[in-house]
Image (tube, helix red, strand yellow):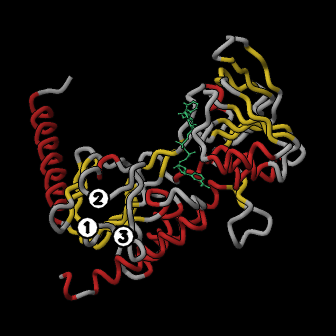
Amino acid sequence: MLNFGSRALHRRARLANLIVNGHALNERKLFVYNVIIIGSGCAGLTAAIYAARANLKPFVIDGFEPGGQLSLTTMVENYPGFPDGVLGPDLIDNMRKQAQRFGAEFKAGSITAVDLSKRPFTISAGNESYQARTLIIAAGATARMLGLENERKLVGHGVSTCATCDGYFTRGKEIAVVGGGDSAMEEAIFLTKFASHVHVLHRRPEFRASKIMLDRARANEKIRLVTPVIVEDVLGEPRGAVEGIRLRNTQTNDVTTLPVEFVFVAIGHVPNTKIYRGVLDMDENGYLITRQGSKTNVRGVFAAGDVQDHHYRQAVTAAGSGCMAALDAERFLEDPREA
Ligand code: NAP
């Protein structure tokens, strides 16, 4: 138990600490960063490397999935410069170190609010607020998942959301693609280059995919379209590698097991743009619209990576657009008309 003297001391220390913290918070609110980058995937980290090398001392707020989608992948074989491939988490880790080496500052946390109505912009992450002259949004898009426990456990061990990344590993194997949209058809067609058979599993008898994509899938003798089925479970635990999926036909209620070694979940992506609704221009699916490189409709706000690209969605294209956003931010800051 504290005696009176030590209790007073303790209280003074606590107050002092609060004042120190309060002061730091105030100072932080007053401090205006040249550039704040939201998101630490390939796009955000490349923007950070370029902005840091331009001496802009960028401040990177990680977002809810630090490292982005690459941190959820295993071997990446299509990123230039790695003839033997590179593990996704290693690639991301190296990019982060590279940005830090040039002075980028990182902060864990997710953005809860933004005020882009005036400059400097205010960005809030919980109780903390930051101000910036320019903002680069590289918050990515999250692949929609089925929401099954074993699906989550087997991501990177047979469950994938990226055919371009993992297709090569399916050589000669029987695999499944879940989804009935253009992505599912495109991935299924692409995967026939490697896999022996591709089962496309869709929950309704009608497909959402465009006629041309559907026709192409139907014409491919390696593809088998299976409807109306829902995936009830991904099998492979505790072995740690996919060995099948359990399906239920929604019309007959028949439950079957399909022996496959890979499951590609292609049921859409959700761009992480909710907090910019009504402020930044976006398409009907929520992807930010960029013009003249990485510019959004708000001057000084730029976007890079999957948050503004549902077409290519590659690590290397995300990195390229991160570079563009940093260069655009740098030019904006140098422009006397924007002072
Ligand atoms: P999408 O068009 O939204 O299709 C998603 C598919 O996944 C739908 O068939 C949907 O079923 C199914 N789905 C969604 N949630 C599910 C769940 N929880 N369980 C099972 N199935 C589920 O998404 P997308 O295919 O990624 O395409 C997105 C946009 O990009 C589209 O505009 C598309 O045309 C475009 N795109 C174009 C191309 C191309 O032209 N080459 C390629 C890829 C994407 P329901 O149909 O029952 O809702």
Say which of 326 and 9 sits in front: 326
Q: Does mark 2's beta carbon lie closer than 8 Å to ligand 1? A: no
Bin the neighbour count of mark 2 within 10 Å (Cα to Cα): few under 14, some 14-19, many 20 and up. Answer: some
Q: Which residue is mark 3?
A: 58
Whether residue 261 appears in this view of the structure is yes
The residues bearing labels 2 and 1 have C-alpha atoms spaced at a distance of: 7 Å
What is the three-letter code of the residue carrying label 3?
Pro
* Left or right for 265, reference 319: right
Task: Tell me the element at label 1.
Answer: loop
Tell me which numbered mark, 2 or 1, is placed earlier along the sequence.
2
Q: Which residue is mark 2?
A: 280
The residues bearing labels 2 and 3 have C-alpha atoms spaced at a distance of: 22 Å
**What residue is at 14 percent from the left and 57 percent from the top?**
26
**What residue is at 64 percent from the left and 39 percent from the top?**
265
Q: Is residue 9 above or below residue 306?
A: above
Bin the neighbour count of mark 3 within 10 Å (Cα to Cα): few under 14, some 14-19, many 20 and up. Answer: many
Q: Is residue 257 above or below residue 164?
A: above
**Residue 242 position in % (x across, y down):** 77, 32
Circles 2 and 1, Cβ within 8 Å, touching? The answer is yes
Residue 298 tag number: 1
**Residue 165 position in % (x across, y down):** 70, 54
**Residue 149 position in % (x across, y down):** 60, 25
- Dot in front, 3 or 1: 1
Circles 3 and 1, Cβ within 8 Å, touching? The answer is no
What is the three-letter code of the residue carrying label 2?
Leu
